[in-house]
Amino acid sequence: MRATVPNPFDELMEHAKRLTDGDTREQIVASIFQTSRQICQETVTYTKQEKRYETEKLDRIFTSKIWGFPIMLAMLAVVIYITIAGANVPSSLLAEFFGWLEGYITLLFQQLHAPSWLHGILVLGLYRGTTWVVSVMLPPMAIFFPIFALLENYGYLPRVAFNMDRLFKKSGAHGKQSLTMAMGFGCNAAAIMSTRIIESPRERMLAILTNNFVPCNGRWPTLILLASLFMAAGYTGGWKTFATASVVVAMVVFGIIVTLTVSWILSKTALRGVPTHYTLELPPYRRPKIWDTIVRSTLDKSVYVLKRAVTVAAPAGVLTWVLANIHVGDTTVLAYSAQLLDPFARQLGLDGYILLAFILGLPANEIVVPILLMGYLSTGALIEVDGLHSLKQIFLDHGWTWLTALNMMLFSLLHYPCGTTLVNIYKETKSKKWTFLSFAIPTAIAIVVTFTTAHLVQWFGLL
Amino acid sequence: MTEAKLARLSDANPGERFRITTLKIEGTMKRRLLDLGFVPGSEITVLQKSPLGDPTAYRVSHTTIALRKEESDHIYGERIGNE
Amino acid sequence: MNKREYTIALAGNPNTGKSTLFNVLTGLRQHTGNWPGKTVIHAEGFFTYKNEEYRIIDLPGTYSLYSNSADEEVARDFIIFSKPDVTLVVLDATALERNLNLALQVLEMTDRVIICLNLMDEAKKKGIVIDIANLSKKLGVPVVPLAARNKEGIEELLETVARMVHGEINTTPLVVAYSRAIEEKIAKLLPLVKEVVGEEYPARWVALRLLDGDTSLLHALQHHPHHFLKEGATYACHCAKSV
C-alpha cells in the first residue's frame, strides 16, 4: 500500500536534497557562533583581565614539558602516602572493636547452647570474613577516594589525559582511555560502564580489555598491606610509609605500562586499526567545595564497601569456613585443593593457598587476603588479627619471602577481573568471546610475569 | 585561488593567533570541530603542546580544547601574529 | 483525576555543573538506567514544588544537538518528541560564548526554555559580569543566574519553572538569522515541511535539519510517522518504560 502512495517524507527529503550543498552545516554553525559572539559582546564584560587566563597559566605548569610528568607522579605518590599513613590507626581501631564485639557474640552463642558448627559458620566464617573486609578496606578507601574526588573536581584528570595522550595514540588506543582508567582506581566494574565515552567500538574494546590492569578498590588494600609488610620492612616511621607508597606507585606505573603494551599488541593483531579522531576539552580549574566533596565521597565509598562486605564477603566467609571444615580423609577440602594447586603455584613464586585464595576470590578481590589467612590457619577460621606483626608472622611461618609478597602483588595487579566486572563486560560487549578474552589475557599475563620474576630471582640467586 | 598561501593550524606555534578559513575534513570529526567553535572566520590561539609534543591545546571561544596533529592538519587559515 | 506531573528536560554542555543542578533539585529521588536500545545513561529524578510534582530528565551533556553521536540523538529526540513542559539549558557563565551555541539550538526547537546561567560564583571570581536582563531580552526567554554548588538561585529557578508550566510566561525565542542563501532555501522548504509534519513540530528547525542532510532525523521521521502525521498524538519517547 505504502509503495503506491508516494511517501510525503521521501518527497520532502528529495526536495531538501536538491537544495543542499556540501557546506550547509558549516554555514549554519558559523551563523550560530556569530550570533553567540554578538550576544556575548553586548552582554558580557571582563573586569579582571588578570584572572581571565588563570587556567591557562596553571596549565603551563601542570602540562609543562618538564613538570607535567613529575607532577603527575608526585600527585599519585602523595595520594597513596596520605592513604597509607592515615589508614593505619582507624584500621586497627576497627579491628579491635570487632574483636571486642566478637567476644560478646561468642558468649551469647554459649548462653544459647548453640552447636559449635553454627558458631563456626556464623561467627568464625561470616562475622570474621565481613569484619575483616570492613576494617581493612574501609579506612584506606575512605581516605583515598575523597582525595581523588578533590583532584577530579578541581579539573586535574583531563590534564592527565592531555599529558598521556601520545602514549595512548602510539599504542593504538583512544586518549580517553586514561579517563576510564582513572575510574578503574575506584572500581573496574564501574569503569567498564564508563568506557561508553569512547565511541569507536575497537578502542572501547581495548579500554575494556585492559581496564583491569589498574588496581581497584578491592586490590589497593592488598597492595598496601603486602608492600608495608615485606617491601618496607627495613624502614621505620615516616620512611616506612614512604617506602610502602613508592612500591605501590611502582605497581601502578607497571600496570599502566602493561596497559599500553597490551593495547599496542592488540591494536596490531586482533583489534587492528588506527586511532580515531577525538577532541579533549580542558575545562577551567575550579576550587572544589572541599567539605561537600569529602563528605559525599566518604559516605558513598563507605556505603559501597559495607555493601560489598555484606553481599560478597559474608557468603565467601561462610563458604571458606565450610571448605576448611569438611574433612576428606585426614585433610580438609581447602587443604586438599591447596595441595593440588601447590606445584603450579610454586612455579609462579606463590603457593597453593595463595592461588586458591585468588580462585575463591573471583567474586570480589576484597576477600582474597581473608581467605588466604583462613587457609593458613589450621583452626579453619579467620584469625583475629591483633596487629600487623602477627599477620606478618603468619606469612613467614608459611615460608613467605619478599618474592612471595612481590609476586602476590603482581598477580593481584594483573590477574583476571572480578566477577562483577566480568558480568559488566558481558553486558556491555554482548560477546562471550570478548568476555572470555578479558578473563584470559590478564590471567595469562599474570602467570607469565610471576613465572618470570620467580625464575629470574632464582637464576640470579637473589634470595 | 589563494589557497596555496593558507597555513595549517598544526604549523602555528604556541602563542600564535590563527584565523580559520576552511576545514578540509569530512564526516563526524568536522561536525564535532564545528560544534566546538572551530568555525570558518573564528580566531583561535595556540596555547601549548602536551609534554610529549602532541596533542596541542587551543583557546577557542573562551574554552580550551586539545587536538591531535591528525585533526589540526586539516584546519587551514591564516597565522595572524602573536598574542 | 490524577494530579498532573510536569516534565522537565535538563540540557547543557559537559562540565557546566548540569549534574550538580540535577542532584540539588532531586536529592535522593533519582534513578539511572539506560535509554532503551542505546548505551547512553538515562537519569531521571523527581521533585515537588508548591504541591506540584515534577519529573526531571538529565539529558546527556553535549556540545550540540545535531545528532553527531548517540548522546546528541537521545537529547534531541527527547526535546522534539517528548515535548517536555520546560527545557532547562544549563550554561557555564565563564564560557558563555561557546555554551550559547547549544542554547540557540534549543531555542530553535522549543519556546518553553529557561536558561540557567550556572557557575555564577566562578564568573564573579574571574571578574566576568553578565547583563542578565539584556541577555534575557536578546534570547527572548527567562535567564536565571545560579550557583548550583552553593544552592544559590534555586528558589528563583523553581519559581520560574512553575510560572512557565502554568503558562504565565510568554517567550519570544531568538531566531538565528542565517546567510541569505540558506534563508532562501528555508523559505522554499517551509510550506512543504508544514504540510507534511504539521504544526506540532518546529517547522523552521525541521527544514534546517533537512537542508543539513540529517539522516537520523529522517530515520526518526520514518520510524514514527504516526507521531508526525496524527494531530495531537502524544509521542511516548524512547524512554517510554519510565513514564
Image (cartoon, grey):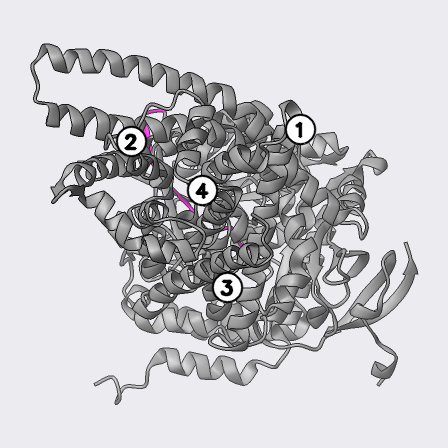
Write down the residue under mark 4.
A219
Asked if residue A184 is positioned above or below residue A139 in the image, the reply reads below
Mark nearer the N terminus (4 vs 1): 4
Q: Chain of mark 4?
A: A
Q: Position of residue A202 (x, y in %)?
A: 48, 70
Asked if residue A257 is positioned above or below residue A61 in the image, the reply reads below
In this rendering, position of residue A179 left or right of residue A187? right
State the separation of the CA atoms marked 3 and 4: 52 Å
Kind of residue at badge 2 = Gly
Q: Please rate how many residues cluster around mark 4, counting C-alpha atoms within 10 Å: few if below 14, some from 14 to 19, many from 20.
A: many
Residue lying farthest to the front in this orientation: A461
Write down the residue under mark 1.
A239
State the separation of the CA atoms marked 4 and 2: 16 Å
Asked if residue A273 is positioned above or below residue C109 in the image, the reply reads below
Whether residue A240 is visible, yes or no, is yes
Return the mark for residue A129.
2
State the separation of the CA atoms marked 2 and 3: 61 Å
> Which dot, 4 or 1, sits closer to the camera?
1
Q: Tell me if residue C57 is in the magenta stretch.
A: yes
Return the mark for residue C205.
3
Q: Chain of mark 1?
A: A
Picture residue at 58% right of the left edge, 62% below the top: A260
Q: Please rate how many residues cluster around mark 3, counting C-alpha atoms within 10 Å: few if below 14, some from 14 to 19, many from 20.
A: some
Picture residue at 17% right of the left edge, 37% below the top: A322
Q: Chain of mark 3?
A: C
Report which quarter residue B7 is drawn in. Answer: bottom right
